[in-house]
Image: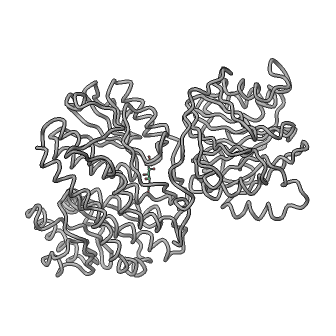
Amino acid sequence: MCAIVGYVGHRPARDIVVNALRRMEYRGYDSSGVALLDGHGGLTVRRRAGRLANLEMALDETVGDVLAGSTGLGHTRWASHGRPTDRNAHPHRDASGKFAVVHNGIIENFASLRAQLEVAGVEFASDTDSEVAVHLVAQAYRSGATVGDFEGSVLSVLRRLEGHFTLVFAFADEPGTIVAARRSTPLVVGVGDGEMFIGSDVAAFIEYTREAVELGQDQAVVITADEYRIYDFAGNRADGHARPFYIDWDLSAAEKGGYDYFMLKEIAEQPSAVADTLLGHFDDNRIVLDEQRLSDQELREIDKVFVVACGTAYHSGLLAKYAIEHWTRLPVEVELASEFRYRDPVLDRSTLVIAISQSGETADTLEAVRHAKTQKAKVLAICNTNGSQIPREADAVLYTRAGPEIGVASTKTFLAQITASYLVGLALAQARGTKYPDEVAREYRELEAMPDQIERVLVGVDSVSALAKRFALSSAVLFVGRHVGYPVALEGALKLKELAYMHAEGFAAGELKHGPIALIEGDLPVIIVMPSPKSAVTLHAKLLSNIREIQARGAVTIVIAEEGDDTVAPYADHLIEIPAVSTLFQPLLAVIPMQVFAAGVAQARGYDVDKPRNLAKSVTVE
Ligand code: M6R
């Protein structure tokens, strides 16, 4: 939800930290702040509510050389405890102003810790849970077993904290050292030459180094310019448990590359997101999921599948259900991860739980995974972020290879998630023998052809941008689909809600007559996903009737239909054509005009497409 960064090295920390915040602002943008150490016992904090630009202005207005050091911390916030104001922005300091902390996550026992500190005379300067951490460290440094020991003080405090957190501490009297720690929220170390970095993700330092180390659960790290040392919270060295890795994408992947918004670039990257996700997964006429770690025997023993996910990832899960049930005849339930563990789902050793998450950090999905594991179910994560918490805790993982997604609205990762879950469906069908090898190969070949089809849709979406301008002032938009078109309608509505702050709803077309049709009135735009006339003729005919009903009530119909589907033209006020593909693959194409429409309406309304209000890219609170 928030982004944290830390730097110790030989360059101006201010530039490094602000650059890192700019690259990670998508993780939270309610406020931002930095703490810079001048190397002579001084620690200067600047923090501002609102976008990073406000902080940059405050830094520019600072006179003198207090911002000139080469050690610093930074933070961008998605507010959880305390309103997004200057005083609640991070970093927080102790009363002496010598210690500073930035925090991502929630300290669940902060209320009792705060009460203890207040009894001891500590005055709080914010409403956040985070501030307790810095006062506790200052207290531990000044008295007791860890007196005068910065690292030891931090470790002793970590042992008292409950919840999930990434914390990064700096101390003005030890300007060449930063101490950081993580529990259930991300933290990576960037290993440079004579400089070390800490970041919520590698975007914090990709400009300077591609060598990184990922910390394990309940680990702390001490960085200086020349080394990093990893500890467990008991203070034992734990370097062997951290995972060094090489970042295999470069700076250009984290930059806009000429597009006005990351989201527009990411929409354009969808062909390669799908192609790269497929890469290496079909060999010798078989689906190969080498990272998956579940044997064919284990796949054969599965008798039920659950998919757990949130938001867009949940919509990809709904599509996975159609494919997996069709190809394997296994029953599949799709559940919002935030609801899953509260209703006592029936799980056992022969249940496969597929957890879909772009970030691999979503707290709701992580808790669903943990619940599934307590019930002995097998958990397979479909994830876009290498080594993040959900794949670490799952029994098996299949990575989507969509590359970094910076726009808060998921686009290319949605297509990559559908692709990956279809691969899982085909692997299950292959292992269980519910499809002949040539049938599996045929489905795979069609999946493999999708990047070219997606490219064709992208070439033709200019007309959608024009429609977006035309309907930008509408008060609402409805999205309607049947069968696999229904999750696409839900996703289209989610995109419009989150980006354009417009009332939008997705409906199963057959449900309209059971209530929602009452919403339809003159000039209301309704976006309809039309199934192929070749795939399910009855479905096609039924949807045509639904469109007539919508049109008869005065709505404006915008129909996404297969090229050459002449039957639909008379009922479409606006027709958006997409290439003809098999039913299960149509969502990979039909959603694209909806993404472009939502981005276009948001732009026409003057909103920030990459950073919609109240949202953040990864949601690490429940
Ligand atoms: O990182 P995750 O895929 O687990 O995130 C889940 C949802 O928060 C996410 O899909 C969200 O709905 C989208 N960013 C919306 O576009």
- Between 458 and 410, the one nearer to me in the picture: 458
Colouring rule applied to residues: one colour
x, y percent for residue 598: 42, 69
Quadrant housing residue 527: bottom left
Residue 416 versus residue 394 in the image, above or below: below
Residue 475 versus residue 153 in the image, above or below: below
x, y percent for residue 251: 57, 58
Q: Residue furthest front?
A: 284
Q: Residue furthest left?
A: 538
- Between 339 and 360, the one nearer to me in the picture: 360
Q: Which residue is located at x 50 percent, y 50 percent?
A: 248
Q: Which residue is located at x 51 percent, y 46 percent?
A: 619
- Between 337 and 317, the one nearer to me in the picture: 317
Quadrant housing residue 305: top left
Left or right: 381 as drawn, with respect to 361: left
Residue 182 versus residue 314 in the image, above or below: above
Left or right: 75 as drawn, with respect to 532: right
Quadrant housing residue 332: top left
x, y percent for residue 225: 75, 41
Asked if one can make out residue 515 in the rendered structure from this viewpoint, the answer is no
Residue 136 versus residue 554 in the image, above or below: above
Q: Which residue is located at x 15 percent, y 70 percent?
A: 544
Asked if one can make out residue 519 in the rendered structure from this viewpoint, the answer is yes
- Between 196 and 236, the one nearer to me in the picture: 196
x, y percent for residue 54: 72, 63
Numbered-mark total: 0
